[in-house]
Amino acid sequence: MAQLDTPMLLQSTLDALSAHIAVLDESGQIVLVNEAWRTFAKANNLAWPDYGVGRNYLTVLETANGDFCDGSKEAAMVIRELIVGQRQRFNLEYPCHSPYEKRWFTVRGTTFKNPHGTHVVITHEDFTEQVRTAEMLRASEEKFATIFRLSPNAISIHRLADYKFLDINESFTRILGYTRSEIIGKTWTELDLAFSIEKRNNLVNLFLENGSVDDYEFDFVNKHGQVITVLISLRQIKISNEACFLLIAHDITERKQTEEKIRQLNIELERRVAERTQALAQANQELQKAKESAEVASRAKSIFLANMSHELRTPLNAILGFTQLMSRDQNISLPQRENLRIVQESGEHLLELINDVLEMSKIEAGQIKLVETDFNLYELLNSIGDMFNIRIQNKGLQFFLECAPEVPIYLYTDERKFRQVLINLLSNAIKFTEHGKITLRVFYNYLRHRLLVEVEDTGIGIPAEEIETIFEVFAQTDRGQRLQEGTGLGLSISRQFVQLLGGTMSVTSEVGQGTTFSFNIHAPEGKMTAAQSAQKRTTITPLKPTVQTTRHETNQLDLAVLPVDLLTKLEQVTRLGNISLLNDLIKEIQPYNAALAKSLATLADDFEYTQILTLIQEAMIQK
């Protein structure tokens, strides 16, 4: 067997070890180091020649300066004790921090003798990681202890073997009402904490099956017998190698009480809703019966008014006709003429009242329907201007008709209702204007197919406090009541018609300055029919846009073109108020002037007999 090189074997053996190893002689001088010692010296910039071999290690330890030199001096002392034989070995832990990091070492020492004397073997083992781990564990335990102590949730630690309380925080004692000493070492059963044994057993089984539980709703019974509802979470932990479990309970008692209150309120609300629903159903039944009764009454009223209006109009038109004939008699006295004037005005007022009441009754009964046709707007505007021309001249007023260039000649809407709205607004304007002018403006929006109309006067104006009520049924301004003219239905009917035509109506007014009524309706551009085309070529001169005039130049309502015998016959039939005879006579007029016949037919349909008689009188004067 080959002889081994003992020094080389010793060096190789030392280099294979992980501990930092140095061999000292009796004086403390380093005579040998291993590879781990050399590596540590390199890593920490220890500028020792030959890694300290030949230096006195005891001197190094005894002269060390710094924050952690106490451990070095103690190590030097025990090494000397080894050298002199007071110790056989030693084990010492001390910090030995480098410039880059804090480190901890275990220093062990032992001696051996050889022919050259006593030698000491010093080993350094780095246990820095163990120290750091311990510090982290200690910090973690301190953090857990702080959370455990200050948490608003109730926290307890139990031994898994017997479920006894090992520790609790203050929140747990507050919830349960027991002191710490009354709880530690006891079980739930001993303290009778579970409100429901079944739920407690279910909680235990879930934990044993799954190893954890989250948000399990549970009811504790505290020391005072009160039920505390909590959400329990369980986690298995180990303390000193003993199986335990951590319990965290979040108190939801107030939330459950609030939920119960809400549930009770919902029950009460549902009960009230059911009662209200039943009451509403009963009220609806009664309302339906009342509605049916009202509809029956409304139909009866409409039938009655229609019949009565015909019965009243016929004698009333006769009275008005004979009153006008008598007023032409040059032999009657002034008192008699004044009496006839009173009869005439009263009759006209009564006829207007009958017409308005009938119209309103139709609106209320829902019997008003749209009858949309194509018609000549300019012709209609001219005819209305002619209709009011005499009244305007008699009051010394000016009348302006302003039609914007974009306004089409033909429109498609309900001509009769549109015409009635204009008549009502112009009648009011004339009635409440003593001097100045009345202006009718017409505009058109092609993008929206809307016709915009304004009727402006320079009359007495409407006080602000009366503006809100003028559209109400039978509502009249203070001045209107003093004049004792009208029924208080005209504006209400007009607004109803405008709404039926798909529009709105508004009013602005200033006392002493005048009033402007504005409305807009849905009115697409219309088409000219064949009859209208022929009529236009022979008799109609359409109103030009932006016309401003105080006297219409159209002859559409000039009855002077009719023979005297036809005029006389027309007067007699009109005074009788017989609509059938009147329409037959108008057909005879059509060959003379189709436009005139159409205008007279419109007046007849609206029972405007007084207006027809006025036109007849003007024609007779011209004859």
Image: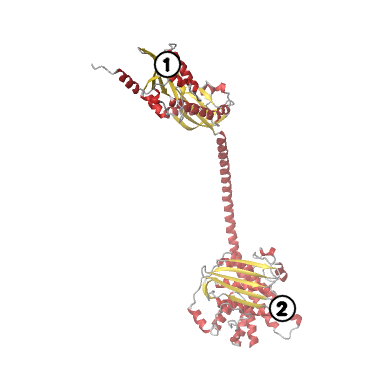
Indicate whether 147 appears above or below 490.
above
Q: Secondary structure at mark 2?
A: helix
Q: Is residue 88 left or right of residue 559?
A: left
Indicate whether 252 appears above or below 63.
below
Query: Is there any visible trace of residue 161 in the rendered image?
Result: no
Specify the quadrant of the image occupied by residue 90: top left
Type of colouring: secondary structure
**Whole-number angstrom distance, CA of label 2 to CA of label 1:** 157 Å
The mark closer to the camera, 2 or 1, is 1
Query: Is there any visible trace of residue 459 in the rendered image?
Result: yes
Q: Secondary structure at mark 1?
A: loop
10 Å neighbourhood of mark 2: few (<14), some, or many (≥20)?
A: some
Give whichever of 431, 581 is nearer the camera: 431
Give whichever of 317, 501 is nearer the camera: 501
Residue 409 lies, in percent from the top left, at 53, 76
Q: Residue at x 49, y 82 (%)?
A: 534
Which amino acid type is marked by label 1?
Answer: Ser
Q: Is residue 120 left or right of residue 548?
A: left
Specify the quadrant of the image occupied by residue 380: bottom right
Specify the quadrant of the image occupied by residue 453: bottom right
Give whichever of 415, 1 is nearer the camera: 1
Residue 436 lies, in percent from the top left, at 68, 76
Which amino acid type is marked by label 2?
Answer: Arg
- Residue placed farthest to the bottom in the image? 623
Q: Is residue 21 left or right of residue 515?
A: left
Indicate whether 402 appears above or below 29.
below
Which labelled disc corresponds to residue 27?
Answer: 1
Return the residue at label 2: 341
Give whichever of 512, 155 is nearer the camera: 155
10 Å neighbourhood of mark 1: few (<14), some, or many (≥20)?
A: some
Indicate the quadrant containing the N terminus: top left, top right, bottom left or bottom right: top left
Residue 326 lies, in percent from the top left, at 70, 82
